[in-house]
Image: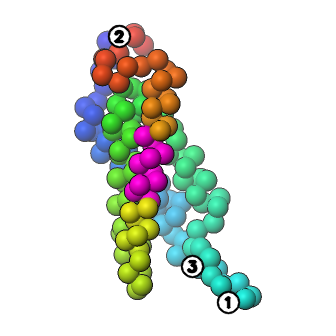
Amino acid sequence: MERRPHPLLSLLALAGIAVAAWAGWLGWDQTRDVHPDGSTTGPYEAWQIIGLVLTLSFPLYRAASRHHPAAAATGIPLGLTAAALYDWSDDASGLYMIGVILLLGGSLTTTTALTALITKLNGHNASAPSTRQS
Protein backbone atom coordinates (compact mmCIF):
# COMPACT_ATOMS: atom_id res chain seq x y z
CA MET A 1 0.00 0.00 0.00
CA GLU A 2 1.33 3.40 -0.98
CA ARG A 3 2.02 5.75 1.91
CA ARG A 4 0.69 9.24 1.25
CA PRO A 5 1.61 12.40 3.13
CA HIS A 6 -0.88 13.96 5.52
CA PRO A 7 -3.29 16.35 3.74
CA LEU A 8 -2.03 19.30 5.82
CA LEU A 9 1.52 18.59 4.68
CA SER A 10 0.28 18.48 1.08
CA LEU A 11 -1.52 21.82 1.55
CA LEU A 12 1.61 23.47 2.99
CA ALA A 13 3.79 22.00 0.24
CA LEU A 14 1.44 23.28 -2.46
CA ALA A 15 1.34 26.72 -0.86
CA GLY A 16 5.15 26.77 -0.77
CA ILE A 17 5.35 25.67 -4.40
CA ALA A 18 2.92 28.44 -5.37
CA VAL A 19 4.98 31.09 -3.53
CA ALA A 20 8.17 29.86 -5.23
CA ALA A 21 6.46 29.80 -8.63
CA TRP A 22 5.19 33.36 -8.07
CA ALA A 23 8.72 34.50 -7.19
CA GLY A 24 10.16 32.76 -10.24
CA TRP A 25 7.62 33.94 -12.78
CA LEU A 26 6.30 37.24 -11.42
CA GLY A 27 8.32 38.40 -8.43
CA TRP A 28 11.22 39.82 -10.39
CA ASP A 29 9.12 42.00 -12.75
CA GLN A 30 8.08 45.24 -11.06
CA THR A 31 8.25 47.65 -14.03
CA ARG A 32 5.13 49.00 -15.69
CA ASP A 33 5.17 49.60 -19.44
CA VAL A 34 4.37 53.19 -20.48
CA HIS A 35 2.74 53.51 -23.90
CA PRO A 36 3.05 56.53 -26.23
CA ASP A 37 -0.40 57.77 -25.21
CA GLY A 38 0.71 57.87 -21.56
CA SER A 39 -1.24 54.80 -20.42
CA THR A 40 0.51 52.09 -18.46
CA THR A 41 0.18 48.32 -18.41
CA GLY A 42 1.84 45.58 -16.50
CA PRO A 43 3.98 44.82 -14.75
CA TYR A 44 3.30 41.25 -15.91
CA GLU A 45 3.23 39.96 -19.47
CA ALA A 46 0.91 37.21 -20.68
CA TRP A 47 3.78 34.71 -21.05
CA GLN A 48 4.61 35.11 -17.36
CA ILE A 49 1.05 34.29 -16.28
CA ILE A 50 0.89 31.35 -18.68
CA GLY A 51 4.21 30.07 -17.31
CA LEU A 52 2.92 30.37 -13.74
CA VAL A 53 -0.28 28.49 -14.56
CA LEU A 54 1.55 25.71 -16.40
CA THR A 55 4.10 25.41 -13.59
CA LEU A 56 1.34 24.98 -10.99
CA SER A 57 -0.68 22.54 -13.12
CA PHE A 58 1.48 19.51 -12.36
CA PRO A 59 1.48 19.87 -8.54
CA LEU A 60 -2.29 20.48 -8.64
CA TYR A 61 -2.82 17.34 -10.73
CA ARG A 62 -0.53 15.30 -8.51
CA ALA A 63 -2.27 16.32 -5.28
CA ALA A 64 -5.76 15.83 -6.72
CA SER A 65 -4.78 12.42 -8.09
CA ARG A 66 -3.39 11.31 -4.73
CA HIS A 67 -6.68 11.81 -2.86
CA HIS A 68 -5.87 15.23 -1.44
CA PRO A 69 -8.61 17.27 -3.12
CA ALA A 70 -8.94 19.81 -0.30
CA ALA A 71 -5.20 20.43 -0.27
CA ALA A 72 -5.13 20.66 -4.07
CA ALA A 73 -8.00 23.12 -4.16
CA THR A 74 -6.76 25.37 -1.36
CA GLY A 75 -2.97 25.12 -1.14
CA ILE A 76 -2.17 26.86 -4.40
CA PRO A 77 -4.64 29.74 -3.87
CA LEU A 78 -3.30 30.30 -0.34
CA GLY A 79 0.27 30.42 -1.63
CA LEU A 80 -0.60 32.74 -4.51
CA THR A 81 -2.54 35.01 -2.17
CA ALA A 82 0.33 35.21 0.31
CA ALA A 83 2.80 35.97 -2.50
CA ALA A 84 0.55 38.65 -4.01
CA LEU A 85 -0.09 40.22 -0.61
CA TYR A 86 3.64 40.52 -0.02
CA ASP A 87 4.48 41.57 -3.59
CA TRP A 88 1.74 44.17 -4.00
CA SER A 89 1.67 45.61 -0.47
CA ASP A 90 3.87 48.57 -1.45
CA ASP A 91 1.14 49.93 -3.75
CA ALA A 92 0.57 53.56 -2.74
CA SER A 93 -3.05 53.63 -3.95
CA GLY A 94 -4.16 51.06 -1.39
CA LEU A 95 -6.10 49.18 -4.05
CA TYR A 96 -3.79 46.19 -3.91
CA MET A 97 -6.08 44.48 -1.40
CA ILE A 98 -8.87 44.38 -4.01
CA GLY A 99 -6.48 42.64 -6.38
CA VAL A 100 -5.43 40.18 -3.68
CA ILE A 101 -9.07 39.33 -2.90
CA LEU A 102 -9.86 38.88 -6.60
CA LEU A 103 -6.78 36.67 -7.00
CA LEU A 104 -7.87 34.53 -4.05
CA GLY A 105 -11.41 34.17 -5.41
CA GLY A 106 -10.32 33.43 -8.97
CA SER A 107 -7.59 30.98 -8.07
CA LEU A 108 -9.78 29.21 -5.51
CA THR A 109 -12.59 28.86 -8.05
CA THR A 110 -10.21 27.59 -10.73
CA THR A 111 -8.33 25.10 -8.56
CA THR A 112 -11.59 23.78 -7.08
CA ALA A 113 -13.05 23.22 -10.55
CA LEU A 114 -9.86 21.59 -11.83
CA THR A 115 -9.57 19.40 -8.74
CA ALA A 116 -13.17 18.23 -9.17
CA LEU A 117 -12.51 17.49 -12.85
CA ILE A 118 -9.28 15.59 -12.13
CA THR A 119 -10.93 13.59 -9.34
CA LYS A 120 -13.87 12.71 -11.58
CA LEU A 121 -11.71 11.76 -14.57
CA ASN A 122 -9.51 9.56 -12.38
CA GLY A 123 -12.58 7.85 -10.97
CA HIS A 124 -11.74 8.75 -7.39
CA ASN A 125 -14.18 9.24 -4.62
CA ALA A 126 -12.69 12.09 -2.55
CA SER A 127 -13.75 10.48 0.73
CA ALA A 128 -12.59 6.94 -0.03
CA PRO A 129 -8.96 5.88 0.43
CA SER A 130 -7.17 4.45 -2.54
CA THR A 131 -7.18 0.66 -2.88
CA ARG A 132 -5.07 0.70 -6.02
CA GLN A 133 -1.59 -0.82 -5.73
CA SER A 134 1.28 1.10 -7.35
The kind of residue tagged 3 is Thr
Residue 66 location, x and y as percent? 39, 26
What SS does tag 3 mark? loop
Residue 1 location, x and y as percent? 31, 12
Residue visible at 51% across and 69% down in the picture:
28
The kind of residue tagged 2 is Thr
Q: CA distance from mark 2 to mark 3?
A: 51 Å
Of label 3 and label 1, which has the lower sequence position?
3
**Looking at the figure, which quarter contains the C terminus?**
top left
Q: Along the horizontal axis of the image, is 118 left or right of 79?
A: right
What SS does tag 2 mark? loop
Q: Is residue 90 visible?
A: no
- For label 2, the crowd category at 10 Å Cα-Cα, with few meaning under 14, some 14 to 19 and many 20 or more, is few
Q: Where residue 130 is drawn, which disc sits there?
A: none
Asked if disc 3 and disc 1 are in contact, CB closer than 8 Å, the reply is: no
Q: Is residue 42 above or below residue 53?
A: below
Q: Which residue is mark 1?
A: 38
Residue visible at 27% across and 34% down in the picture:
7
Residue visible at 27% across and 39% down in the picture:
9
